[in-house]
Structures are given as C-alpha cells and as structure tokens.
Amino acid sequence: MNPLPHNVLPDTAHVLSDGSLAIGGVPLLDVAAQYGTPVFVYDEQHLRNRCREAVESFGANRVVYATKAFLCKAMARLAHEEGLMLDVATAGELYVALSAGVPADRCVFHGNNKSLAELRYAIASGVHHINVDSFDELDRLETLASEGPGKPRIALRITPGVEAHTHEFIATGQDDSKFGFNLGNGDALRAVTRAQRSSAVELIGLHCHIGSNVFAASSFARAAEVMAGFAAPFDLPELTLGGGLGVAYVGGEEAPTISEWARVLLDACRSLGVRSAVNVEPGRSIVANAAVTLYTVGTIKQIPGVRTYVAVDGGMSDNARPILYGSGYEAFLPRAVLGDRSDRVRLVGKHCESGDILINDAAVPADLRVGDVLATPVTGAYGYSMSSNYNMVTRPPVVFVRNGESRLVVRRQELADLVSLDVD
Ligand code: LLP
C-alpha cells in the first residue's frame, strides 16, 4: 500500500536481497552507520549522468551549472570535469569554484546586486563574462574600467514579462521582479543601447531566467519566443535562456527530462531563426534527484484524535524548502524500501519552532520506530546550499557514493565550528 514512487530515487538506487536500499552500490544503512545522521548522500553517477545528458542535449560549452543549487569543491570539480561551466552568483560562490581549481574563464558571474568589490574580484579573476542586472551595475563597471585589465565581457539579464507557473517566491520572469532589465517598459532596449556604446564593456549576449521548478514546457517556449524576438536585431553571439526545469518531488508528479527540455528550447529557437549560441543554466535538474537525506528517528508522539508526530535529528536547518515554499517530499525507510507505507504522520525536525516541518502528511510504514534511519529523497538541490545553523544545530556532512564506495566530501560541522567566528 502506497509504495515509494521509483522516480524519486537516484539512478543507481538498488534494492538488496534483504529489502534494503543501496545507492552507488553502498547500502544506505552503512552510510548512516559510518558517517552518522543527518547526512546528505549523493549518487555521483546520477550527477554525472545528468551533466552528460545536458551537454549531449545542448552541446559542449552551452551548459552552465547553477551552483546555488548545490556547491562544494567536489561538486564544482565534478561539473567542470563533465564539461559544464559554472554560474556563480556571489563572491562566495566564485571563491568556492576557484578553490576547487575551476578556471575563472569557466565561470559566469551573476547576481542582482553585485558590489563594487565583487565586480572587481570577478574581473581580476578573469570570469568568462558578467551577467549585468541593472543600470547601477553598468555604472559600477564604468567606474572600474580605469582599473583594467581590459574590457569585461557582459551579457544583459532581461525580464521578458513571461509568467512561469511555479511558486511566486521563485518566479522571476514576470514584470514585477527585482531581477533584470524590464523588456516591456523599454529598460531592456535602453540597456542594450548603452552597453553597445560603452567603452567599458563588451556586450556578448542576452540572458533571461523565468523561474525555478517550472514543469510547463510552454513557459520555456514562450520565454524563448519573446527573447528571440527581442534579441534578433542585435545579432549577438550568445543567448542564455536560464535554468528552471522542475523535478518530481512526490508521487504523481512528472517533470520533463533535460533532453525533453532541450528539445522544446532548441526547436523553438530554430523555428524562430535564432543565430546566437543558445546556453542554459540548470541547477535543480542536475542535482535534486541525486541525493537523499538520512535522518534518525528520535521521538514518536501520538496525540489521539489529532495526529502522530515523528521527530528526526535534523529539520528546517537542513531543508528549509517545506517551510519556505510549502514543498512536498516523500519519506521511506532504507531498511525496507519497498514496504507498505500505510501510516500517516507529520515528520518534524528538532528545532524550537512549530513550523519546523519536513513533511506535513508523510506516508510511512506502520512499524516505524525510534532508532530507525529514515530517508527523504530529492534533497540534492537547495537543501545543503540553504542550510543554516539555526538553534546552533551543526550542518550535516555530504557523502558521495559510487561503485560500491563512499567518500566524505564535506565533513560534519563540529561544535567548535559554531564559535569559530566569535572574536571575544
Ligand atoms: N539561473 C539563474 C539566473 C537563477 O536565478 C537560477 C535559480 C538558476 C539559473 C537555476 O535554476 P534551477 O535550474 O535550479 O531551477 N531556493 C529555491 C530555488 C531558487 C532558484 C534561484 N535561482 C528552491 O529551493 O526551490
């Protein structure tokens, strides 16, 4: 009854003869035993498969991985090895990419409010180009022009006025947005004219990103259409159509694959006569389904006539998405992955807050007990990257599994890390 839907598990998920689950050839219970819980477990082959699918679909040098979805040195290196460029949206993301050994010219610098210091850092590092978001940023680039070295390449982020069908907090293509130059009110055209005339920058392309976790192919096709129409007269070398492809988090959801997404975008561009190289910036669709989070069940509280609360050893500090966007997740027991999930419980964390809910109404096996390792799949995107130290809970480690081996790529925070910034 109510089995776990298979499409929420990573590519190499494999049910062992005792009914337990292995990923990358490593039993999840072994990962929990070795590294403790909570822990993010990434299927490295799944990450590589999605990178390869993207590069095969869009072409070499046309895929820019949006590092905000999940970034650490191992992930930066993996994406770089697979031929992806990296979208970095802050000095911090650029720093991690460079620390991982990714060449600066494989990084594209984003952000709606880049500081002078960030722009200076990006230019001095030699990023491939900067995605400019405002007239104030153009002012800052002109201020920096006298410092050299050379003219930075830029693209302009355009807000195409296309409503993406997703949560309003992660929709960015509509007119009412803090991002980009508005197409409808003439700002986009004014920005292109100014950039083309400026001796401080070299305009190489236009960019848009309509939102995140978008399932409707029609939204992407519409954005491509609007952008192609706007870009045509300028004949610039590059057109970037953003990221935003959704993924299935729970049973019943079905998202387009990266190849299907590519078909929609590239067919639209072809039929619109786009001559620029078409780039994309996927984040979630590369990493989300690659990971599961393992927790340990610590407390089960039955409130007769109300509900049962199951509390685990993490919560909103390692997955803020339910509380931020009302996002749904599934839960399963790695010891019996195919088992019936006949009970309904509220899965909560350990934070001092009633809103600390991981799954509002989770289907779980009836024999769930204290001490069980419990997993939530599809936590590879915007989980670790949005984690916090709320309640001074330490951040979980990140483990990559592949070919029967596990490796720690980010260690667990220790208590001492929690005071490492305090100066007195
Ligand atoms: N390009 C730009 C300019 C972006 O702003 C983003 C995401 C992406 C690409 C990657 O989008 P993706 O392929 O991952 O959908 N924290 C939210 C998502 C925020 C997305 C921000 N920008 C969440 O957990 O759903």
Image (cartoon, rainbow, N blue to C red):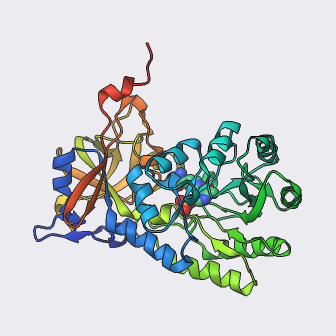
Pick out the residue farthest to the left: 18
**Front-lying residue, 267 or 369:** 267
How many labels, in total?
A: 0
Which quadrant of the structure image shows residue 312? top left
Q: Nearer the viewer, residue 63 or 260?
A: 63
Residue found at the very far front of the displayed protein: 149
Residue 378 appears anywhere in the view: yes
The part of the image, by quadrant, that contains residue 231 is bottom right
Whether 280 is drawn above or below 179: the answer is below
Q: Residue furthest bottom?
A: 271
Q: Residue at x 76, y 53 (%)?
A: 176
Residue at left offset 40%, top offset 44%: 357
Considering only vertical position in the picture, is 269 above or below 394?
below
Q: Locate the C terminus by quadrant.
A: top left
Percent across and percent down for residue 272 are: 75, 83
Given residues 285 and 4, the one toward you in this image is 285
Q: Is residue 248 left or right of residue 133?
A: left
Quarter of the image with the N terminus is: bottom left
In the rendering, at what x and y percent does residue 393 appear? Answer: 35, 33
Left or right: residue 23 compared with residue 198: left
Horizontal relation, residue 127 to residue 178: left or right: left
Residue at image point 81% right, 50% down: 200
| Residue at (75, 76) in percent of width and height | 225
* Quarter of image, ligand 1: bottom right
The answer to whether residue 256 is visible is no
Above or below, comparing residue 246 to residue 407 in the picture: below
